[in-house]
Image: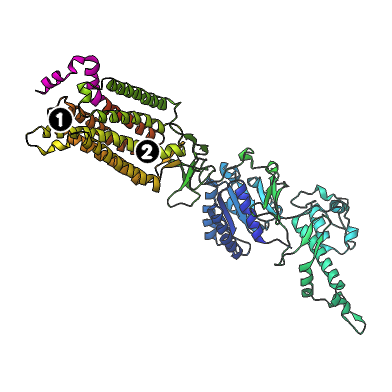
Amino acid sequence: MVPSEDRQYKGLIRLLQHFDWTWVGLFVVGDESGDRFLQAIEQLFSRNQICSAFSQRVPNQAHIPSLDDLKGLTKIIDQPFMDQKTKTFIIYGETTVLQWLITLMFLADPDYKENLSVGKVWITTAQIDFAVGTLIRGWNFEIFEGTLSFALHSSELAGFQSYLRNIRLSGTQGNGFFKDFWEQAFSCSFPDLSAPTNADGICTMEENPESLPGAVFEMRMTGHSYGIYNAVYAVAHALHALYSSRFTHRARIRGKRHDLQDLQPWQLHSFLHSISFNNSAGETVSFNEDMEMVAGFDVVNIAIFPNNSFRKVKVGRVDPDALEGEELIINEDLIVWHRRFNQVLPLSACTNSCDPGYQKKKKEGEKFCCFDCNPCPDGKISVQKDMSDCFRCPEDQYPNKDRDGCIPKIISFLSHEEPSGMSLASLALSFSLVTVVVLGTFMKHKDTPIVKANNRDITYVLLLSLLLCFLCSLLFLGQPWKVTCFLRQSAFGIIFSVAVSCVLAKTITVVVAFVATKPGSSMRKWVGKRMANSIVLSCSLIQAGICGVWLATSPPFPDLDMQSVITEITAECNEGSVTMFYLVLGYLGLLSIISFTVAFLARKLPDSFNEAKFITFSMLVFCSIWLTFVPTYLSTKGKYMVAVEIFSILASSAGLLGCIFFPKCYIIVLKPKLNNKEQLMRRKI
């Protein structure tokens, strides 16, 4: 009729978890049942992140310790009360454990009731009858004020208290137990007709059981009484089922029927196992496959008064039919804590809880309940207390300042509206306009010696390619789309290759023209537009072929970069094949180096206008910009990678435009007198 102890252990765990008590002291009876309890509870503690601060064995009634053992117990019994971290104690055993514990506390410190450290939360198991313990007279039990006690489940039965109020000796003739109880409870005696009696001490049966303290007589239905009540009805239902079975009806031999005296106790087992009925309290009584009653436990709060009287208040229960983790139902508002706590929920933990945004770090050499609280590392959060590990936000979110929550990332790209994007767009358009002006100037003065020098057609192609270079930088601005991603890198690579090829062609033209002027030179056949056009066309076609392979095999596409910038999602163009991207840049760099080398070697060669020197300087600027581009690009994150590339395109194109064409425009516009054949020939001489 008593529920399994495993259910009580689970209730203990759920009670500790409900109040976040993770550092708990244990007073356990020193016998085999105490050993089993410790083994079971320690495993449950470990699985549920609870630790035992200490485990103190207490003698039981069958074993009286020696004087030396008693002295040793009294020396260590005071230590748990001095520990300010341990606010919760669990007592396991029979009622004698409670009595022994009080005795040891008294022997250790007769004034223990005055000790300021005795504000504790006591939790007792259902085997302990607190009422019996408080019958010890002369001792103070206020230390146990606010105790939470597990008790066998009970419910009030209709008419039970009326029965207790109206009970009389006439209904209990022959009940010696009742007679002895009545005499001891009311300090009276029933008259003995064979001996004289003192009229003052005679039991009149008018005494009121309700006037007795709870420690002596409970007017409410206790768990033990409720179990006995259910047991009687269970046996009655089992007997009824037995005599209603076919076996009983067929068990008549020669007209003789079995009666109760013929029954053996074991014959009721199968019937008891299968019965299920509702008692007068409206609760279902049944048994499980282990022949245990399907019932839970009540959680009782005990308020103790200065005169050692007490009041029990049912504040919760352990529901056997509840889901895992929800077995305990408790009403905190009904609980009265020890007066030392001023009705504030006591804390019982080795270390205060780690707030969200922190993670636990175990202290070396101590139990796992003792830990330090360290802030979550960068990029990680914790959203609950006492988390062992922080975790990362989803890819589209990032940690807030306190690292206890995630904030959605915003989508970012280099827009035309923002200052940096607007500035780059303005520069691109401005340089484009300048290039158009320069091209117009050259076309207007196309017949002048300066424009004719060094292949006029190549000059036009170079200016057009620079114009397209400035304009193609606009493809990098704004939100990436499939078309812009597909075009921008390949357009940039091909157009720049054309521009650098033109510079290379102009430089080689200077070298070939100088060599061809020597008597008997075989290079004269190479002088002319054919060679320059071949250089521009062949160098550009190689870059176009690389870009064609890139676009055909692994073209760039719109993508979202969620990792580079913590607070942003960068909308970007994924280059598809990084190898092909750097191959395009590498080929462009190779052309630039060749152009720079040839121009540098030809910088002192005489020509009609010393263009080689300006080409050398322009290629030096060009190469310097793109050499610094690569490390800068790799070290930049988010939308600013695009800004770096746009700036490099604009700066290198402007370098070519300024260094090669500014001196010529200066003579054409401001010094037209120098723009004639005689002046150029004189400078050449």
Amino acid on which disc 1 is placed: Arg
From the top left corner, tell me how far across and down residue 71 is, in percent: 53, 56
Please say if 158 is above or below 40: above
Q: Nearer the viewer, residue 63 or 38?
A: 38
Looking at the image, residue 391 sits to the left or right of residue 424; the answer is right
Depth check, front residue: 436 or 76: 436
Quadrant location of the N terminus in the rendered image? bottom right
Label 1: few (<14), some or many (≥20) within 10 Å?
Answer: many
Determine whether 377 is above or below 68 in the image.
above
x, y percent for residue 380: 47, 42
Quarter holding the C terminus is top left
- For label 2, the SS is helix
- 551 in the magenta segment: no
- Res 625 → quadrant: top left
Q: What residue is rendered at 58% in x and 46% in y?
A: 20
Given contact means CB atoms under 8 Å apart, are the residues at marks 1 and 2 in contact? no
Image height of 155 relative to 622, above or below: below
What range is drawn magenta here?
A: 658-684
Disc on res. 489: 2
125 with respect to 199 (left or right): left
Give the amino acid type for the residue marked by disc 2 in the picture. Gln
Q: Which residue is mark 1?
A: 603
Query: In the rendering, at what x and y percent does residue 50 appear?
Result: 55, 52
At mark 1, the secondary structure is loop
Residue located at (36% from left, 47% from top): 549
